[in-house]
Image (cartoon, grey):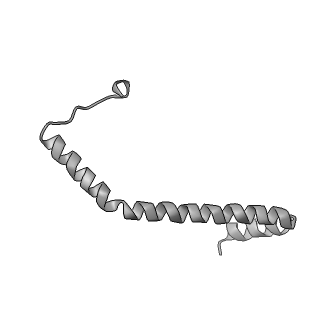
Amino acid sequence: MTALLEQALTELHKLSPEQQDAIAALILEELTDEETWQHAFDQSQDALARLADKVRTEKRAGNLKELGFDDL
């Protein structure tokens, strides 16, 4: 366990059980969200690689027009 996490847990012990549960729920939610995003990112790698290949092919063929922020 890191020193920062130990410090956070020490401070958490000072809170009421209700406050501890609220913070624990936030931490668990954050961990679940991170896992969900990582899974989605892992599953999208093939699609992203195909899209990148398509863009490179289109660029080499001269079929892309470069746009600036004002053109969007």
- Expressed as whole percent of the image width and height from the top left, the position of residue 43 reads 38, 64
Residue shown at 30% from the left, 61% from the top: 46
Name the residue furthest top.
70
Left or right: 58, with 34 as reference point? left
The residue nearer to you, when weighing 68 against 3, is 68
Residue shown at 37% from the left, 24% from the top: 70
**Image position of 66 with respect to 45: above or below:** above
Examine the image and state in which quarter residue 67 appears: top left
Name the residue furthest bottom.
1
- Expressed as whole percent of the image width and height from the top left, the position of residue 16 reads 87, 65
Left or right: 17, with 54 as reference point? right
- Expressed as whole percent of the image width and height from the top left, the position of residue 49 reads 27, 57
Please state, as top left, top right, bottom left or bottom right, where the N terminus lies in the image: bottom right
Left or right: 18, with 51 as reference point? right
The residue nearer to you, when weighing 37 against 6, is 37
The residue nearer to you, when weighing 52 against 47, is 47
Residue shown at 45% from the left, 65% from the top: 39
Examine the image and state in which quarter residue 63 appears: top left
Please state, as top left, top right, bottom left or bottom right, where the C terminus lies in the image: top left
- Expressed as whole percent of the image width and height from the top left, the position of residue 22 reads 77, 61
